[in-house]
Image (cartoon, helix red, strand yellow):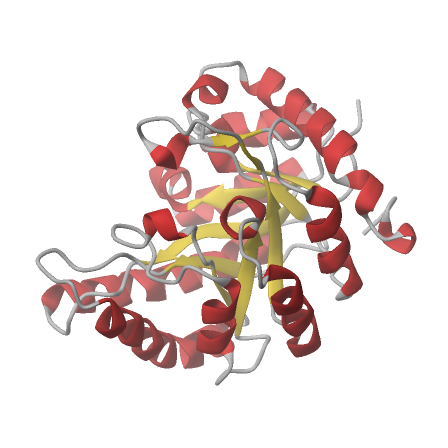
Amino acid sequence: MSAHPRLSINQATIKYATLDEALEATVAGGVEAIGLWREPVQAVGLDEAARRLADSGLRLSTYCRGGFFTMPEGPARRASIDDNRRGIEETATLAGAGAPGSTSVFVLVAGGIPEGSTDLIGARARVADALAELAPEAQAAGVTLAIEPLHPMYASDRAVVSTLKQALDLAAPFDPSVVGVTVDTFHVWWDPEVLPQLARAGNEGRIATYQVCDWKAPLPADVLLGRHYPGDGVIDFASLTEAVEATGYTGDIEVEIFNKEIWDTSFGEAIARTAAGFDAAVVPHLAASVRAAR
């Protein structure tokens, strides 16, 4: 069984898998790339994780996640910045261990409004400050910090960066190889400005990764878990994928799903259904020149 060569399984889609289980299931599903998460990597240690990734033959598409640095200056912010420094180092090590075509992309989720505060503007300003502090270290390591805008319903607790425009504005002071953006269909599909902002992202060379999953109402009580397989909801993958492809993006396309029912299925079934949804909803809209290969 072989999946589309540009499909990558983000490890969140099979959240309960250990690192070994995730690597094995991804390979067994005929998928060539994986987006890893920090917790399973740290559970075995960075060097061991890098060795296992190398042995798997998989490409690394992204490493998730850093960020969460919206708090005021103080011990908590220093701890967060230091943790992001470690994340940069981990990304570089894992990308170096992955198969040819691996990318050193460290996905950043900004963080929400600090507890006890209502200062949304200040929280966003502190994201810019954190990027300025981390960018030189990312550049030295050959890592791209990929700011991920999240749907506005997460602005209070997860990400004060809610639109692609906001993410691009934050990235603008930096070289595109150092600070780019994560385009995730679940978070941007609703935005009336998404298509021109995708064109802008392409012109600026800022698209570090493209992630796909679907949106279907009603959302669950925990809105974090409201993602679905591509094609099972209302997202227009045609317009979004064609807009991303028009920018010249030819990299891996991750499917990242947070959904308790999907997590409760076997890893093999989740990957097979992911691949089927990807083939039906995304592949027909890839540029002809890169439809069959990276």
| Residue depicted at x 30% and y 71% | 124
Position of residue 81 measured from the top left corner of the image (x, y, whole percent): 27, 67
Quick one: which residue is furthest to the front in this view?
192
Q: Please tell me whether residue 177 is drawn above or below residue 290 in the rendered image.
A: below
Position of residue 79 measured from the top left corner of the image (x, y, whole percent): 19, 63
Q: Please tell me whether residue 157 is drawn above or below residue 226 in the rendered image.
A: below
Position of residue 41 measured from the top left corner of the image (x, y, whole percent): 42, 42
Is 11 placed left or right of 73 in the picture? right
| Residue depicted at x 45% and y 15% | 264
Is 20 placed left or right of 209 in the picture? left
Is 193 placed left or right of 124 in the picture? right
| Residue depicted at x 22% and y 74% | 122
Is 262 placed left or right of 185 in the picture? left
Q: Is residue 217 visible?
A: yes
| Image quarter hosting the N terminus | top right
Q: Between residue 214 and residue 86, name the one nearer to us.
A: 214
Q: Between residue 219 and residue 93, name the one nearer to us.
A: 219
Q: Is residue 143 visible?
A: no
Position of residue 58 measured from the top left corner of the image (x, y, whole percent): 66, 41
Quick one: which residue is furthest to the right in this view?
289
Q: Between residue 73 and residue 37, name the one nearer to us.
A: 73
| Residue depicted at x 42% and y 63% | 89
Q: Between residue 54 and residue 23, name the one nearer to us.
A: 23
